[in-house]
Image: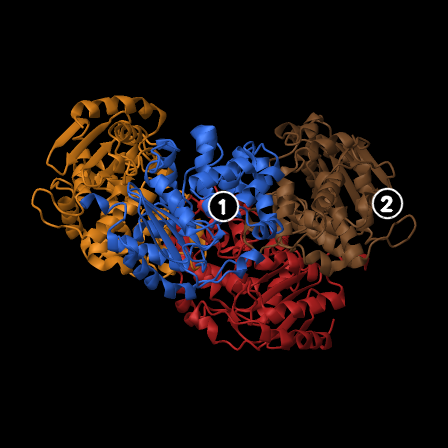
Chain colours: A blue, B orange, C red, D brown
Amino acid sequence: MDEVLLKQALEFGQPYAQKGKVASYIPELGKVDGQELGICVKTIAGETLHSGFWKQRFTIQSISKVINLVVALEYQGFEAVFRRTKMEPTGSSFNAMSHLSDSEAIPFNPFVNAGAIAIVGLLVPLGLEQMLSAVQGLCSDKYITINEDVFQSEWANCARNRSLVYLLQSKGLITEAVDDTLRLYTQLCSLNVTAESLSNLGRLLANDGIQPETGNRILKEEVVRTTLTMMLTCGMYNGSGEFAVRVGLPSKSGVGGGILSVVPGEMGIGVYGPSLDSKGNSMAGQRVLEYISRTEKLHILDRYAR
Amino acid sequence: MDEVLLKQALEFGQPYAQKGKVASYIPELGKVDGQELGICVKTIAGETLHSGFWKQRFTIQSISKVINLVVALEYQGFEAVFRRTKMEPTGSSFNAMSHLSDSEAIPFNPFVNAGAIAIVGLLVPLGLEQMLSAVQGLCSDKYITINEDVFQSEWANCARNRSLVYLLQSKGLITEAVDDTLRLYTQLCSLNVTAESLSNLGRLLANDGIQPETGNRILKEEVVRTTLTMMLTCGMYNGSGEFAVRVGLPSKSGVGGGILSVVPGEMGIGVYGPSLDSKGNSMAGQRVLEYISRTEKLHILDRYAR
Amino acid sequence: MDEVLLKQALEFGQPYAQKGKVASYIPELGKVDGQELGICVKTIAGETLHSGFWKQRFTIQSISKVINLVVALEYQGFEAVFRRTKMEPTGSSFNAMSHLSDSEAIPFNPFVNAGAIAIVGLLVPLGLEQMLSAVQGLCSDKYITINEDVFQSEWANCARNRSLVYLLQSKGLITEAVDDTLRLYTQLCSLNVTAESLSNLGRLLANDGIQPETGNRILKEEVVRTTLTMMLTCGMYNGSGEFAVRVGLPSKSGVGGGILSVVPGEMGIGVYGPSLDSKGNSMAGQRVLEYISRTEKLHILDRYAR
Amino acid sequence: MDEVLLKQALEFGQPYAQKGKVASYIPELGKVDGQELGICVKTIAGETLHSGFWKQRFTIQSISKVINLVVALEYQGFEAVFRRTKMEPTGSSFNAMSHLSDSEAIPFNPFVNAGAIAIVGLLVPLGLEQMLSAVQGLCSDKYITINEDVFQSEWANCARNRSLVYLLQSKGLITEAVDDTLRLYTQLCSLNVTAESLSNLGRLLANDGIQPETGNRILKEEVVRTTLTMMLTCGMYNGSGEFAVRVGLPSKSGVGGGILSVVPGEMGIGVYGPSLDSKGNSMAGQRVLEYISRTEKLHILDRYAR
């Protein structure tokens, strides 16, 4: 892989940006330029490749669900996490509540809002500062901060998520203070990252939880395996199944336009393209990743033949 | 891997058989012995390993959905197949119809009944004889025949599937004769296979569609990749997500008690254990596979580290 | 009440016809003129009032569900009928199946398709000829016959209803032959009636089941009470609640454009206006009835004050 | 009607109390004696009839939804109320949220929790004191106060209702302060009434909104008609349809064990029997009302024949 390929991939993906729309349910999110597109790749071997808007800051949104999951698994363990959410993909949209109406039901997985919020509850004792420092560490990017404008805009429009939190509380799936949980969840959605930050996180996951530069193990093997599997089956909202067929890389998207992708054993990839399809995934970003996966034969089920 | 490991795996899984129940919705299925347990492994290199009831015939049931998918993809192509079904996993049970009530909706994936039946429609022109011969070839088992008792029992109890077929017809997702479609679907569920037959099919998929003994390509690469991905995200009914985390091998279960598992690039595995959990997956069989995957580090996301 | 009032009511309702659409899901139904509007009133005292297209034949469609219910209650009894369907109104549309996906569930009421078909099963032993003669008697209209064009058109487009029948069969809610049940159901939907036929049926129900002209009891009191109650709570599809508030007369609509209304103790009303709202109720017809009910204070909860 | 009949009705109903259970989802509600049963009837003519525990105080619970509706209709008007809720009965349970998951959806009717809470929002400007005084007036019972123990118990267990409020807020169906709305809603559920209080309210509705003793009009005709119709179609949770067939009186039940019933033009009835069926309706109370309705021919569709 080289930067020529990345450039070709962006060129391939660019036209699709026009077919989507930037997120608008949060006023502040609607202000970005939907035509921006960028990518950054970090290999375990130490290489950095990039093209386009790879330095552009954008909000992490649902990709924070990956960080929430790994930190919760490290901090509270597998049992505690999966008492609050199942591990099943769902054909429903990310903010669905309908199946939770039954009193027995628990959220489908850690990457739908309901499951993610339940997991953030487990992180409340850590507080924002520790979480921010964890994010900066996992992404090797000490410039990650909260985008205050986006946070305020989301905080002022979070009635549906607040409804979810109380529904979870009524089921005993959240025992932490509601306000603390929801604020932390929303703050973690509002973090300013770049395609490069995501590629650093991806590389760490690709290397099984060991920071390549230092050789230090940051995350347990089981945490990485669980997280990558969930990304593979549930990472792209209700488009996860088709993305797994077409691209075949554990990935997580956010409505800020980011996609985090992992090529296990090889590299992390961060993509930024804020024009979204109807499911909330970056329109052009998905095509960029499909181009690269096809060209380089990175599909997780193709790689044994090499 | 050796037969000692397989024996240990069966010993590990055996106690779980008591916690499940054999399928009973079809009278004939209720007659088997729930305590039987067997496994067969075929490596690409040519080795055969087995233990327990590996020669016991049982009906293939939903594992036929894998065969239907590969034959339909080969015979009618990607476009034709995925016009009739999406590729998305679903948290709902295999015979769910509720989401299809909306007039626009199409089945979630080829492994829920609705999707599988829509795909069998595409195979009607081939007819049973050609399909049977295809199955025998894919499984390298010329003794596979229809279990007439099971077929008659299923045929006499297929009102719900018949309801599904007409619902699909009302949406234009089936254009073939209803009776022909439903009969072929039911016949293909009633095929008598063994753990060995499944392991042969698994080995073919593990080897990217090339028959190891002859070097002949039987299935296109894209067909294999698509099928294995669907098995990974949707193969174990509404327990697919957790199975992907715990075992991490593209697999497909059937209520006859079989599980087909694939270790890409290495081997095919067939398991037989007819005592089922509430989702319809072999109770002991899942544990046997978990034991092997953990011991041998076969999880699809563990293997890059080796 | 007099014909001047009826004329005013039609004038009041007429403009609403333009806001609706004639049914189109069955090609043959799409051929009628949506601007037609007519009404016929028959009082227990023996008066006949009419205006507009009161002699125009149209297909009875869902209003046959009222006839199916009364005949089934007379012929098979309360227990037999309400073993196959509940008596609960539902906020869902008439052809909903989603709630039936659960294996325990039975249809909500006799006026949704699922419930009506289950009830027609009970009528299969009577056969079409006896049912036709029953309809002619109940409606005092010996010219009621099957509209063959509509029947053929519906029969050729009944896959969704056929799906429903098999779903009911899978639940043991239909034990009669599927084809016989569905054909009889569809034939009874295709009967050619007029606003006058409906007003005759309405008068019989208004008079507690006694034919006013002869003094003969045709229907048991309990049958009439049950049927009128169901019409009040469930007769106008998922617009029944609002219609009960605004008009307050036990009524049943059909997508052929008819509405049967009953003023208990006083009169029967038949309306014809084939332009429908999104729920399947006659757009203008509802307004005509609202006008009359308001003007004459016929709302079932207003009449005690008089 | 006389007190002998009421006594017979209680005797008929009493055994059914053993088949139900007192509400337990709120700890404080679980403390009552499920075998208590009482009734009070007030006729427009001025008679009072009673039997059993007619003086026992209990919490009004969902019957407050009737009061909320009439006050909101008087105070804010038909348009304002029915912008926040539809008028449609639903086959779902009183605390269902699933259908609200769709962004367009509004609550089915004023008697499911979601609809009732949306309506209480309209009453927030009035405040508790004015509402309490309104309740005392409508029920002719100046001893009605908040049961503080029940209120505190409900307030400590209202996460699911709080979830509903925020869901409504996210749809713009509540613009009032969430806490104020939810507190007022819960306070109004916790009012201590008797069968007599309910019979007074019933008599007022039976008399078309005019207080019989004074001749003063308290409620507009349209408000009474709308409210009684909603009670007829939606008043008994998801048992409303069957209750309408069997009893046929506009009624509203509460999980405190009360039922308010109205015989239009004649009388109001209050029943108390805290042992509930699975839908939340008084087990014995329903039977008491069925006995009286059958014996006295009070069914709303029977009364024209008299």
Name the foreground residue: D22 vs B300. B300
**Residue D296 seen in the figure:** no
Depth check, front residue: B66 or B146:
B66
Q: Amino acid at mark 1?
A: Ile
Which chain is home to disc 1?
A
Q: Position of residue B245 (x, y in %)?
A: 35, 36
Residue D11 location (% of width, % of height): 72, 30
Q: Residue furthest right?
A: D214
Q: Quadrant of the N terminus of chain B?
A: top left
Name the quadrant of the C terminus of chain B.
Answer: top left
How many numbered marks, from 0 up?
A: 2
Answer left or right for B183 relative to A188: left
Query: Is the residue at mark 1 from the same chain as the one at mark 2?
Result: no
Residue pushed farthest left? B214
Kind of residue sitting beneath label 2: Gly
Image coordinates for residue C101, horizontal then vertical, percent: 44, 46
Mark 1 or 2: in front is: 1
Judge from the rendering whether residue C85 lies leftward or rightward of residue A217; answer left or right: right
> For the residues marked 1 and 2, what is the alpha-carbon distance in whole angstroms?
61 Å
Taking A18 as reference, is C227 left or right?
Answer: right
| Residue in view at x 68 percent, y 44 percent | D247
Where is mark 1, residue-wise?
Answer: A144
Residue under numbered circle 2: D137
